[in-house]
Amino acid sequence: MHDTKKIYESTFIVSASLDDHQIDGVIEKVKDVIVKNNGEIREMVKWGRKRFTYPIKKKNNGFYVIAEFSAPGDVVAKLERHYFLDENILRYLTIMLDKKALQGRPAPSLLASEQPSTEAKPAEPVKPASAEGTVGKVDNSGVA
């Protein structure tokens, strides 16, 4: 029986205390897990080191990576098992992308830094609201 491939997006956070080549090694292991289980990497985006809002496993910083891949459904369980067993991966989340989510997205090869810039029009100045005609007008004549 041939299992159809679906498109997934997996975000994981690697411990930022590792050197860059060690982080690349962790990312390569994730790629290997996907490819060895009949998956195909569509895009791998390294967001880089970011500071956490709150500590995760007693760490304040992490290296964020987003992987978009197509694979049979059983790959997700194997990938998340790998995440769980790798002590350098602090958090992870894998979601399946549906057709609606894929329609509004740019092609995987078009990274955020390569997207064409769109200039926004400057906002029109806001006119102050006048006190005339407002409900609950206050009478400041001093008479109670």
Image (tube, rainbow, N blue to C red):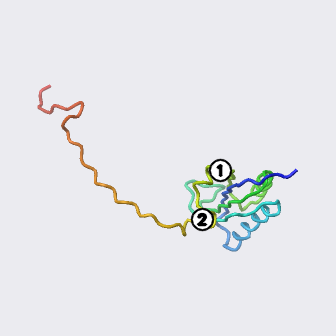
**Numbered disc 1: secondary structure:** helix
Q: Nearer the viewer, residue 102 or 82?
A: 102
Q: Residue furthest right?
A: 1
| Image-quadrant location for residue 9 | bottom right
Q: Residue at x 66, y 73 (%)?
A: 20
Q: Residue at x 60, y 65 (%)?
A: 47
Q: How many numbered callouts? A: 2
Residue 87 in the image: above or below residue 101: below
**Numbered disc 2: secondary structure:** strand
The residue identified by callout 1 is 99
Q: Residue at x 68, y 55 (%)?
A: 92
Q: Residue 31: x percent and y percent? A: 75, 65
Q: Amino acid at mark 2?
A: Trp
Check contact, mark 2 vs mark 1: CB within 8 A: no
The numbered mark at residue 133 is none
- Answer left or right for 1 relative to 67: right
Dot 2 or dot 1: first in sequence order is 2
| Image-quadrant location for residue 69 | bottom right
Label 2 neighbour load within 10 Å: few <14, some 14-19, many 20+: few
Residue 134 in the image: above or below residue 36: above
| Image-quadrant location for residue 55 | bottom right
Q: Amino acid at mark 1?
A: Lys
- Answer left or right for 128 relative to 37: left
The residue identified by callout 2 is 47
Q: Residue 127: x percent and y percent? A: 25, 49
Label 1 neighbour load within 10 Å: few <14, some 14-19, many 20+: few
Q: Residue 29: x percent and y percent? A: 77, 66
Q: The C terminus is located in which quarter?
A: top left
Structural distance between the alpha carbons of marks 2 and 1: 25 Å
Q: Residue 89: x percent and y percent? A: 71, 60
Q: Residue furthest bottom?
A: 21
Q: Nearer the viewer, residue 42 or 2?
A: 2
